[in-house]
Image (spheres, rainbow, N blue to C red):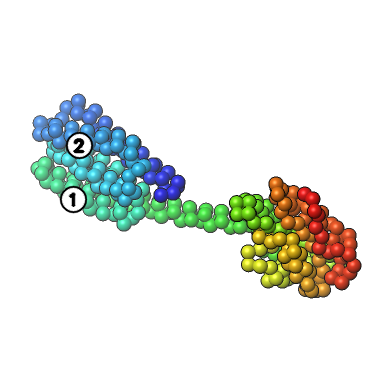
Amino acid sequence: MNEAQRTSQTFVARSFAALFGLGGLAVLLTLVLSHPPDRKLALMLVPALIALGLAGCLLLAGHRARPRSLYLLPPLGSVLVAVVSYGAGSALQVPYATFLFWSVTSAFYFFPRRVAVPNVPFAALLYGLALVLGNGPYLAIRFLVPMAAVTVSGILIDRLNVQRNRLAEELRDTLTILEEQARTDPVTRLPNRREFTRQLNRELARARRAGHVPAVLMIDLDRFKDFNDTQGHPAGDRLLRDVARVWSNRLRAGDLLVRYGGDEFAVILPECGMEDAKRLAERLRAPLPAEQTCSVGVAVLVPNESGEQLVSRADEALLVAKRHGRSASGPGVVVARLQQA
């Protein structure tokens, strides 16, 4: 059972503890008041004490009970109510039977419909039996009016639950969409810088546990601003998407390509030494759409280095690459590294 389930079960158990406790206490308090001569004191006192005992058990151990065992609480409550109603005497059966509202409506509120629905005919059967045994007048009216109210209340709560569940599902979908938007670049549909930081920290933790060495590539599209100025931003967005698609196909299955910001991209390379990282960087520099070129900075994790330091070294290497050459055939170092953290 996960934490959410434990929390939910605790809430259900405590709610039923309150129902049983308050119901038992209410019955005990009414026992000091006058009742008809045909009252059967034991049939009122014993169910009230059982209800109070159940309340205590639910408070102490309800969160540890088997979840399905809680399904028995509403019908058990109906049994206790029916016994109290019968014991109260023919003139007071209906007032005590109003406790059936608690047992039936709680079933609809807390449990699935397939569990809740049988509680209605079960409560009706018990209440009808109490009325018949009590030999009171106007049995049909005394039965139909309370049971109609109980049934309608159950139906209303069921409909409210359906609406509540629908709204909760819509809220979950909305939160999922917002979370996706918060970690995804809207132009390229790649992960964004926030997701890069989260995934990098996760990869560094995994690497330290397993003794792996990850690498980071920082990539900058050469003269992308000039392309945007001459071709327009829509064309620039298309180029970003095309380049991102090409790079995604050239990387390994476990590598993570992100749009770091503007015309800058970054790649997390799990379990990748410097030589392999340089080969992957050169593969990314192979011909790109629209004859676009790029510069790449490479850094491999060194001992006792943070993710921020690793990215900073890769970024400095990128600056070196951009200073030495900005074309696939031009002179200078395009893939560079710094030896010190």
Residue displayed at 89% across by 60% down: 323
Q: Nearer the viewer, residue 85 or 314?
A: 314
The correct choice, above or below, for 298 with respect to 144 in the image is below
Q: Position of residue 252 (x, y in %)?
A: 66, 67
* Left or right, residue 194 beside residue 114: right
Q: Position of residue 137 (x, y in %)?
A: 12, 43
- Please tell me whether mark 1 or mark 2 is closer to you in this view: 2
- For marks 1 and 2 on the same chain, the one whose residue lies earlier in the sequence: 2
Q: Could you tell me the amino acid type at mark 1?
A: Leu
Q: Residue at x 68, y 57 (%)?
A: 214
Which residue is pictured at 48% across the width and 56% down the height? Answer: 169
Mark number, residue 47: 2
Q: Residue at x 60, y 51 (%)?
A: 209
Q: How would you rate the neighbour count of disc 2 (Cα within 10 Å): few for under 14, some for 14-19, many for 20 or more?
A: many
Q: Residues within 10 Å of mark 1 (few under 14, many from 20)?
A: some
118 or 301: nearer the viewer: 301
Q: Position of residue 34 (x, y in %)?
A: 17, 27
Between 54 and 335, the one lying in front of the other is 335
Q: Residue tagged by mark 1? A: 125
What number is the disc on residue 199?
none
Dot 2: element:
helix
Left or right, 214 with reference to 145:
right
What is the CA distance from the residue labelled 1 to the residue labelled 2?
18 Å
